[in-house]
Amino acid sequence: MSYQNEYNLSRNEPTAFWEKQADNIQWIKKPKTILSNNNEDNYQWFEDGQLNTSYLALDYHIEQGNGDTLALIYDSPVTNTKQQFTYNELKHEVAKFASVLRKKDIKKGDRVLIYMPMIPQAAIAMLACARIGAIHSVVFGGFAPHELAIRIDDAQPKVIISASCGVEITKVIPYKPMIDKAIALAEFKPTSCIIFQRDLIEAKLLAGRDYSWAKLMENAVEAAPIAVNATDPLYILYTSGTTGKPKGVVRDNGSHAVAMKYSMKAIYDIDPGEVFWAASDVGWVVGHSYIIYAPLIAGCTTILFEGKPVFTPDAGTFWRVCEEYKVKALFSAPTAFRAICKEDPNADLIHQYDLSKLERLYLAGERLDPATYEWLQDKTKLPVIDHWWQTETGWAIASIPYGIEQKTTKAGSAGLATPGYNIKVVDSSGNELAKGEEGNIAIKLPLPPGCLSTIWKNADRFKDGYLKAFPGYYVTGDSGYIDSENYLYIMGRTDDIINVAGHRMSTGEMEEVISNHFAIAECAVIGGHCPIKGQIPTALVVVKNNISLSSADLEVELKLAIREQIGPIASLKAVYIVERLPKTRSGKILRKTIRQIVDGEEYQTPSTIDDPNVLEELQLLLSAA
Ligand code: COA
Ligand code: AMP
């Protein structure tokens, strides 16, 4: 079938389309109701179906006779470790750990927080939760204890699972002190912590609360997967919103499994037994969907890579992994390839490896700039596919669905609407714009299977944040346009979210941290341009009168505050002390204009500005800096 036919079918007959896709997974109770709308715009898929996601990812393949197929490859250049798990072996570990969780009183619907480096135990813990109907919430290791504490208070996990340490290139980072600090900061107190002790560091365990993963696993027996409702949550994944409080995106079991299975073939054109590598982290949505769930539900081999694109040990590491495991498709963020390009501009390292099995490169997480797109295409001679998605959607909204039709890619474009997504570009009043005109990107409801069902314990935030602006549509927070051939171009966010090295960060949250410093009267954080990380946080601060702190000391203290309260991944680049911030007459900070001035771009003085002289002062300050 052509892309256009498949897309039209998904749009004109969504119920029939997704009923057919739902037939491709093994249900415990097959759904009779495909799409329902129980209140206002809250749609649900497969509401009367029952299934188990861990069964689909593991047991099902074993029952089909594929127990000896490789399920997961762990490759860790930072610890010189390689390990492989067949479906039989992975199921054994997962089922045992599921019974460990049961013994710690975890029941269906209970939350489990996972704060892990990129080791197989992270995947095992996630799948074990799914097996017994527990809801996992994975938190990226680069977040500081304060962020962890916010998530503990919101999700209220009975158990936290972690490891004694992570490794960042050559730095060993102890995780346990961060867990202890987060629990001390949080109001809600988990009853147990299960710690995987790595050879590099042995964490100190608190008697009565902390347990060693290995010890608990010693006598564990396998737990069977239980039936859960399609609409029961599989996980909560926190993502940055515009305020300091992250949003707990809730993903259900049933529609997620259907979307994951569909996408593996439709978008990535990967068949069972083939090797797919998403070089991301399990702490992000890409890790959830394409390191763990989709490849395993589809019966493929997935790779869990504990390293960086560069310096572990060099910029050839991605290509080494692709050669070694015969990777068919590689998925990573543009920032990773920009880092590789910086270290290996002439692709000398690429040419050292046999990449004959590698067929395509997929990129997402931030805009794929044309220069990186062209460099990659030129050096690898492979199709380079940008695709656009969000933590909220869980899979690509726009893409080049290679498994349906091998449409051409275009530099700067994130591709065509993925079947299931009805994308519109609208103006601020919600009117659809003509082709080529830039505006807010919205998705007509219902969203396809796999997208968020709500925000954890905050249905109002879900409705207010996503559904209210344009009735009948989900608002993505991105702006862009669609060209005459229906290719979509993402131009940036319409809110205060920035993208640092493919990581989504809230400038509002950083402003909260900076404003809490005793010396600060007012501040604005913007995402300045960075050739490698895409954007990097830069702060403009107004200092209170009679503060004796030197500007250098203030900068050090503010950078430290961001690191300590949000995490090292937020890494503030620069702090500029200004007399006043550019604002509109109604007092709104002109962040876009500030960003343009910081980046040395041309800008237009907004007609709503309070005092145009502030912009000149800022320009003078930056040129002197
Ligand atoms: N645990 C603890 N600390 C972490 C961490 C983790 N999981 N991940 C990052 N950090 C720390 C780093 O050690 C670094 O600390 P430092 O400032 O003390 O050196 C800081 O956070 C910033 O890390 P990072 O953003 O990774 O920057 P970098 O300069 O170390 O590396 C890149 C730059 C481009 C190589 C790296 O950002 C990268 O690989 N990006 C790809 C991101 C990606 O795959 N995103 C997924 C979206 S699909
Ligand atoms: P996250 O929820 O962390 O996956 O971040 C989602 C946001 O990242 C989107 O709303 C976009 O702003 C940005 N993003 C993700 N993929 C792309 C892409 N391919 N092109 C442009 N922006 C992207």
Image: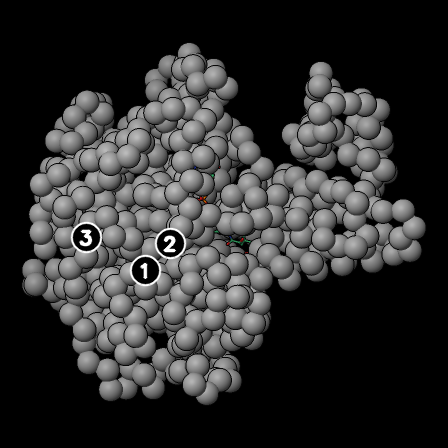
Amino acid on which disc 1 is placed: Ile
Q: Where is residue 455? Give x, y as percent.
A: 40, 46
Q: Which residue is mark 1?
A: 135
Residue for point 23% across, 48% down: 231
Q: Is residue 87 left or right of residue 543?
A: left
Q: Cα distance, mark 2 to mark 1?
A: 7 Å
Q: Position of residue 544 (x, y in %)?
A: 85, 47
- Ligand 1, seen in the image, is in the quarter at bottom right
Q: CA distance from mark 3 to mark 2?
A: 16 Å
Residue 606, above or below 16: above
Residue 400: image tag: none
The tag earlier along the polypeptide, 3 or 2, is 3
Q: Is 501 in front, or is 48?
A: 48
Q: For residue 275, say whether it is visible.
A: no
Residue 578: name its quadrant.
top right
Q: CA distance from mark 3 to mark 1?
A: 13 Å
Give the numbered dot on residue 229.
3
Q: Earlier in the sequence, mark 2 or mark 1?
A: 1
Q: Are marks 2 and 1 in contact (CB under 8 Å)?
A: yes
Which element carries disc 1, helix, strand or loop?
Answer: strand
| Residue located beneath label 2 in the image | 236
Q: Quadrant of the N terminus?
A: top left
610 horizontally vs 202: left or right:
right
